[in-house]
Amino acid sequence: IPLGSCTMKLNATSEMAPLTWPTASKIHPFVPISQAKGYHTMIKDLEEMLCSITGLDAVSLQPNSGAAGEYTGLRTIEKYLKSKGQGHRNVVIIPSSAHGTNPASASMAGFKIVVVPCLPNGYIDLEAFRSKVAEHSENLAALMITYPSTYGIFEEDICEVCDVIHSNGGQVYLDGANMNALVGLASLKDIGADVCHLNLHKTFCIPHGGGGPGMGPICVASHLAPFLPSHPIVSSNSSASALGPVSAAPWSSSSILLISWMYLRMMGSEGLRKATQTAILNANYMKETLKNYYPVKFTSSNGMVAHEFIMDLRPFKKTANIEVSDVAKRLMDYNFHSPTMSWPVPGTLMIEPTESEDMHELDR
C-alpha cells in the first residue's frame, strides 16, 4: 500500500552527519551516565526544546515508535489514576477521526474503548460525544484525540472537547502524528492536552520507512511526570512512582536523537514556525489546484485544510472503472511516490506535501 501522508520530509545531510561520528555511534546503551556526559547534555537539551514546543512539562524519550508512545502515555495515565485511588477508570473515548493506532494501543494497555462518531463534514459529533462522556463518566480514564484530525481539519471545538473530559475526571491524550501542522503555532497544553507523543521520525526529520528506526517520545503535564518510564540499569526517572521500562534501552535508539537535535538547533523557533506555515500553505495550494477535478472530502468550516487533505477518487470507479490503486500505480510509473491510499477513507488519497516541496515541484 503506498504511503505518502506520514510526514515524509527532507532529511538534510547536515542533520545526519553526527551519526557517522564514533563518539555518537559506538556508545553502549547501558554505559554509566558519568561516561556519556556529552550525550546526556544533548538529551537534556532536546527534552527542553520538545517541552517548549508542546508547552508541556516533562518528556520521556524511551518509546521507540509512535504506537509505543501511545501505549506509554496510556500506561502513565493509568499509573496516575491508580495513585489517586481511581484505578477503576478504564474507559478510553476515541473519535472515529483519530489516528488508526489509537484503539490498538488502548486495547494493548487494557482499556475499554468507546468510539465517538463524526459528522458528515468530518467534525466530531459533539452531541454523541457528550452523551458518551456522561454515560461513562464514573469510569472515564482518557480521551485519545488526533489534532488536527486524521481527516486533515482543525476542529474549532477542540478546547471544549478537552474541557468536557477534564470536568468528568479524565485525562486528554493528544496524538502528535499531525504535529507538522502545529509546531511553533500552538501550545498543546493550552489546547488541553495532558500527554502527547511526538514522532521524531516524522515531524522532526529522522528518516523513516521500511520499518524504522523511529522515536515516539511522550511529553506530559507536571502531574504525570512522576509516572514516566524508568529503567532498571540506567535510571531515566528517579521517582518511586515511575512506570517500568517500555524499551530495552533507557533512551531507546539514542543515536538518532542527534538528527532531531540538529534539526531543531539549525531551524530555531522562527524557522520551525515558518516550516509549519509553509506545510499548511502547500497543502491548501494543492487542494485549491485540484478541487475542481477531484472532490476534496473534508475541509474546516472556513474551507481550508490543515497540512494534508483527502482527495476522493470513488466517483471514477463508477464513471471509468478506475480504482484508487490504479491511480497510485500510475503515479509511480512517472516516478512520483503515491500519497497514502484508502486511509482513513477507502477509495481516497491522503495528500501531505509537507514544507519540503517548492511550488515548481507541487505544480509538477
Image: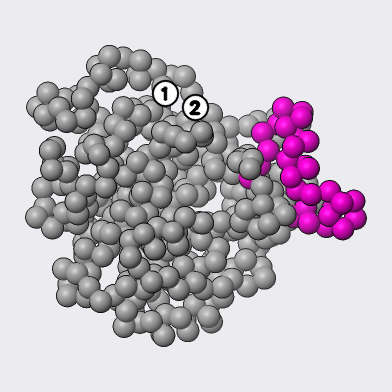
Q: Are marks 1 and 2 in contact (CB under 8 Å)?
A: yes
- Kindly identify which numbered label has been placed on residue 314: none
Specify start and end residues of the magenta stretch as a single range. Answer: 312-340
The type of residue carrying mark 1 is Glu
Find disc 2 in the rendering and name its residue: 11
Q: Quadrant of the N terminus?
A: top right
Residue 343 falls inside the magenta stretch:
no
Q: Quadrant of residue 119?
A: bottom right
Against 251, residue 144 (above or below) is below
The type of residue carrying mark 2 is Asn
Asked whether, in this view, residue 54 is left or right of residue 131, the answer is: left
Residue 313 falls inside the magenta stretch:
yes
Residue displayed at 31% across by 33% down: 253
Against 311, residue 9 (above or below) is above
Instruction: Give the structural element (helix, strand or loop) at label 1.
Output: helix
Q: Residues within 10 Å of mark 1 (few under 14, many from 20)?
A: many
**Is residue 199 something that shows in the picture?**
yes
Against 99, residue 202 (above or below) is above
Residue displayed at 78% across by 42% down: 326
Q: Position of residue 91 (x, y in %)?
A: 36, 73
Q: Position of residue 275 (x, y in %)?
A: 52, 37
Front-lying residue, 271 or 283: 283
- Kindly identify which numbered label has been placed on residue 15: 1
Q: Quadrant of residue 351?
A: top right
Residue displayed at 71% across by 53% down: 348
Asked whether, in this view, residue 260 is left or right of residue 344, the answer is: left
How far apart are the two marked residues, 1 and 2, measured between alpha carbons? 7 Å
Q: Position of residue 212 (x, y in %)?
A: 44, 34
